[in-house]
Image (spheres, rainbow, N blue to C red):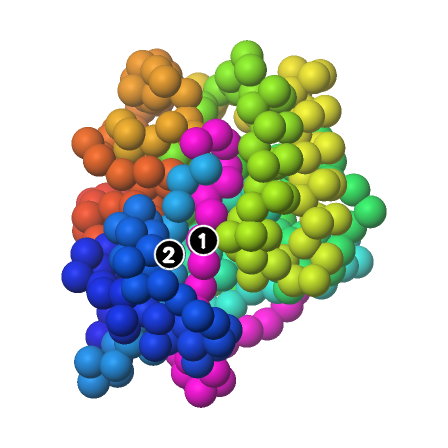
Amino acid sequence: MEYKVNDTKLVASAFIFLANQIWRGDYDMKHTQTALSRTMNITAYDNKLLVGCLRILTDGYFFGTITELLVLPEYQKQGVGANMAYFNYQDKSVFYEEYGQGEPLIFLHGNTASSKMSELLMPLYEENFRCILIDFLGNGQSDRVESFTPDMWHDEALQTVALTEHLQCGKASLIGTSGGAWAAVNAALERPDLFHVVIADSFDGRTLNEDFSTNLLSERKMAKEDIQSREFYEWCQGADWEKVVDLDTEALLKCAEEKRPLFHKPLKELKTPILFMGSREDESCRNNIEEEYREMASMLSESSIYLFPKGGHPSLFSNAEEAATLIKNFISQHIN
């Protein structure tokens, strides 16, 4: 199997052939090529046959990376080497899956997303790491909840701690992207003894933007009316995606309205080495992201910043190959 991250040579004819194996339709070649040029495409080939494609869009607001995943049914059944399991958290079952071997590396997804977001990135990591992908409670294949707490990024941090203890793997490294970045930082603040390093990717830092609630409501309304957004949500969450998205929206609005602290302990208490990562072109993050990252870094004894000059939200995906190299080097620097 050959994987290509940001496959700029993907042609409409190959994509339409793949699409017709899953959703038959009368696809226009020219319009398809135009659509492909507007997305970052992660592709999988078997002997030059396109068997899978993950398309990534930026919604222009917060958290909402819009993706479309097409995989030939016979390749879906192969499982691509994943080991899937559950652990118990507050009397509910939380899903996780594993890829590869080596130093444990836990991937934390953003709001309204799930572990599926990271699955096609695994070829970039599984040769070097034991990769663990979690579905936070209420998302993906984990048990559902009646509501999300407005302090969800703290609760997700506690789930991350519970997962690490369940795995009995010693110290792990954390990659949190978008909303998952807050969960990663909070987990390291809660239990620094469990984590080697934190990679906090594509997030706003210590506070939410002043127009956060307005932008969130607008983005979620548009997303529900957009077929690709709806497909993304269903791919991540399943048939009950709309309820999951609504509960997430309610919790985020309450968090913003009540000005809840995004870190449950002072950031200056973080002792775990951290890499703040993002993209200068990311319209989903605050405009002054570099300034915010620098101010946070100034509080900490071991921190680094890297902003990619190009790419959308989140940079872990839009700059996938470069990000993987950067992350491998950062982890190696602090473990060896």
Whether residue 258 is situated above or below residue 239 in the rendered picture: above
In this view of the protein, which residue sits in the foreground, 37 or 201?
Answer: 37
Whether residue 198 is situated above or below residue 238 in the rendered picture: above
Ranked by sequence position, the earlier of labels 1 and 2 is 2
Q: Amino acid at mark 1?
A: Thr
Q: Residue furthest right?
A: 146
The residue sitting at 40% across, 40% down in the picture is: 58
Q: Amino acid at mark 2?
A: Arg
Residue occupied by mark 1? 67
Helix, strand, or loop for circle 1?
strand
Residue 327 location (% of width, % of height): 26, 47
Which contiguous range is marked in magenta? 60-87
Q: Quadrant of the N terminus?
A: bottom left
Q: Is residue 180 visible?
A: no
Assess whether residue 2 is covered by the magenta stretch: no
The residue sitting at 68% across, 35% down in the picture is: 249
User: What crowding class fits label 2: few (fewer than 14 Cα within 10 Å), some (14-19), or many (20 or more)?
Assistant: some
In this view of the protein, which residue sits in the foreground, 315 or 326?
Answer: 315
**How far apart in space, not on screen, are marks 1 and 2 (Cα)?**
5 Å
Whether residue 25 is situated above or below residue 171 in the rendered picture: below
